[in-house]
Image: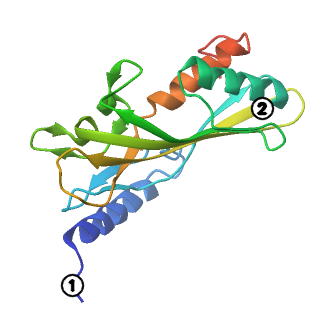
Amino acid sequence: MHRPTGICCLTALLVLGAGACASTPNAAPDTNPAVLIDPSGGVLRTSEGAATASFAAPPDSTFRAVVAAYNALGIEPSTIDPAGRVVGRQHLVLRSRFAGKPLSSSFDCGATQTGPRADQGRITADITSRIIGTGSGSSVSTTIDASLVPNDGVSRDPIRCVSHGGIEENLRRQVSMQLGLSPSTR
């Protein structure tokens, strides 16, 4: 059976990474995803974690602040579920820019010889935030699933993209401000 080169490289990197982690047992785990590109240009991640932020505010207040934060950032929520404490935007279509910046400043979809793929097509993103907690504290866990359809005129499957974390950080800052907390407070 022939294994694709990208899978072999990914396996080797994961094995090497596991060996490196074994030498530092007291180190905090790395929650930043590693982005790898396979030979066909597909984007692979070594972790799928959500961005989580904690707030010194009750969950219901934090839920209302998350809804306001989405709107303040120009992300109109398509899901607002107070009972489940879920806020989200599904099928957010982005072309060329988001929040006044090139899409490549928010997403990594790999690269071509002419530059970042994120700037060469249409990105569709699903953004979901879940608010958990009881009493006077809560946390918000945000995930972003995104894919790119290139503008190159060739019909193909969408290319998977990963967030650089800027949207999640802007949501965290905006939630803090909506709650009357310092944006640097976690």
Label whose residue precedes the other's in the sequence (2 or 1): 1
Residue position marked by numbered label 2 in the rendering: 138
Can residue 58 be seen at all in this image of the molecule?
no
Which mark identifies residue 36?
A: none
Q: Position of residue 11 (x, y in %)?
A: 32, 68
Local SS, label 1: loop
Instruction: Check disc 1 and give the amino acid type.
Output: His
Whether pointer 2 and pointer 1 mark residues with C-beta atoms closer than 8 Å, the reply is no
Residue type at mark 2: give it. Answer: Ser
Location of the C terminus by quadrant is top right
Q: Residues within 10 Å of mark 1 (few under 14, many from 20)?
A: few
Neighbour class for label 2 at 10 Å: few (<14), some, many (≥20)? Answer: many
Compared to residue 27, the image places residue 183 above or below, namely above
- Residue 65 is situated, as x and y percent measured from the top left of the image, at 72, 22
Residue located at (54% from left, 20% from top): 73
Q: Nearer the viewer, residue 185 or 150?
A: 150
Q: Nearer the viewer, residue 118 or 29?
A: 118
Total count of labels: 2
Residue visible at 53% across and 31% down? 168
**Please, is residue 102 above or below residue 152 in the view?**
above
Check the image and report above or below for 151 versus 9.
Answer: above
Residue on which disc 1 sits = 2
Residue at the outermost left position? 113
Q: Quadrant of residue 62?
A: top right
Residue 83 in view (yes/no): yes
Q: Position of residue 74 (x, y in %)?
A: 53, 22
Q: Quadrant of residue 81?
A: top right
Image position, residue 47 (x, y; %):
47, 53
Q: Quadrant of the N terminus?
A: bottom left
**Distance of mark 2 from mark 1, alpha carbons?**
49 Å
